[in-house]
Amino acid sequence: MNTNDAKEYLARREIPQLFESLLTGLMYYRPDDPIDYLEACLKKARELGGPEKVRWDTFVGQEKKPLPPLNGGQSRRSLFRNVLPDSPNFPYRRYDRLPPISQFSIESDSDLSETAELIEEYEVFDPSRPRPKVILVIGGPGSGKGTQSLKIAERYGFQYMSVGELLRKKMIHNATSNRKWSLIAKIITNGELAPQETTITEIKQKIMKIPDANGIVIDGFPRDVGQALSFEDQICTPDLVVFLACTNHRLKERLQKRAEQQGRPDDNPKAIDRRLTNFKQNTIPLVKYFQERGLIVTLDADRDEEEVFCDISMTLDNKLFPSKEPAAGPSELDLSLLGESSSLADVTFKYSEAEDEEDIGYAEGAAESYSTEHRKPKVIFVIGGPGSGKAVQCQRMEDRFGLRHVTLGDLLCNELQSHSERGRHLQEVLERGEQLPKDTMLELLCDAVASSVQQQRPGKGLVISSFPRDLQQAEEYEAKVRAERERERESD
């Protein structure tokens, strides 16, 4: 039997729908004896008429009371229910352990349908257009998936999609009025995975809202092999999967810190432990699945985020753009014109030794537009190809000369987390799948320069890595600086 035969069999027999209903019941009730519970559910499915009669919530009763405790002793005694007398010692029989099942249609609560037939009725991508590149970023909770996904999207001009945010937003808006989403909210809050078909449907609808995307970066999906198979079957095979590997101790530390700062519903202590457990159980088979297909790269995320992103950029450049520059990468500069690396190192070393710490020759860019009564701020741009060591050199300049190291990705992440009016606006733009306004990053950069002068180290300045990326960015930056300078002179 080949892959297509297997898929056809599963679809024809409604196996995915049956599994989803069983998993939903397990996650909702968490019986002590899951095998006994599943046997009871399968018997109920047979009584209903087979898998095709089962819906995702078939084994979840509206009364929302837990099932009677299941333990080994009761399970064994129930096998002899036809020969043992009725007595208080044997109150639960195999056929009455489930609470009363009240059927309802998902369509009555929502315009979505969980049936495989309706899910496969429409195409996600426009067949008349080239399919956008699809990058999946996976890793444990707290591994930095969101940060790195945003950086990838910003560097290559791709659309960013957070599956977790999609579900949380839908959950917040619908949990009180929609039974389906109220159940999903409980599942997610407990640290479990949302129903697979619901997640896939949300991803598909989001992708269809961004038909002009050159590429899509999906943060936090898939979480297990089942989700990976469903994604490939209903959407596409990803161009690349980035796995951010991080120690369990570091993941827990980051999640606890994030819980204090953001207060996400799934960052409570119980959910954190459950999410880490689920991640450990699902990671090995998921990574192995993508490894066998040659789609995954594994990176050590237990490092500075700029170092991690440097490795990601180099990997993406080599795998997705092997014969040309990345979509939003560095300007076309023949680096051979700069001479051998050893010569450059000698010149840099002599230059840094000859200059005094306070009088070193900084790049004099936009400093004048933010002048104060102290010395004008210094602004250094550090550019270079992926893997050239920009982050390391910026860190050294920060340590030695008291500069503040800034990256555009950091500025964007900080703004999104600031809950400011601009941050909320940018978050809404990203959630709609739209491109950020063209001058957004330039405004954030200029604000960072001003903030560094006014609040942190007057007369020092910033070292900015990976900017400008092309001649146009440099010209726009100079034009904005020039305009600010003119306004300052007029006000004087």
Image (cartoon, rainbow, N blue to C red):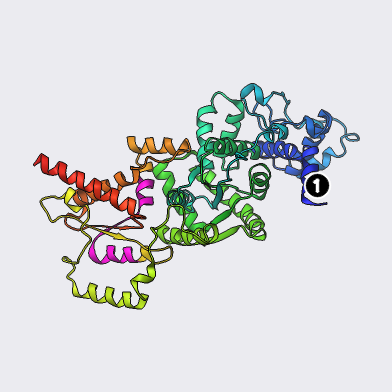
Residue 411 among those drawn in magenta: yes
Taking the view exactly as shown, the residue that stands out farthest to the top is 108
Q: Is residue 181 above or below residue 149?
A: above
Spot occupied by residue 417 in the image (x, y as percentages of width and height): 38, 42
Query: What SS does tag 1 mark?
Result: helix
Q: Is residue 160 above or below residue 290?
A: above
Bounds of the magenta segment: 393-414
Spot occupied by residue 371 in the image (x, y as percentages of width and height): 15, 50
Taking the view exactly as shown, the residue that stands out farthest to the right is 83
> What residue is drawn where x is 50% and y is 34%?
169
Viewer-closest of 224 and 271:
224
**Total number of numbered discs in the rendering:** 1
Taking the view exactly as shown, the residue that stands out farthest to the left is 492
Viewer-closest of 163 and 24:
163
Magenta span dominant secondary structure: helix
Left or right placement of residue 475 versus residue 143 in this view: left
Left or right placement of residue 490 versus residue 324 in this view: left
Spot occupied by residue 134 in the image (x, y as percentages of width and height): 56, 49
Residue 164 among those drawn in magenta: no
Q: Is there any visible trace of residue 285 in the rendered image? A: yes
Spot occupied by residue 454 in the image (x, y as percentages of width and height): 19, 48
Q: Is there any visible trace of residue 91 in the rendered image? A: no
Label 1: which residue? 5
Quarter of the figure with residue 243: bottom right
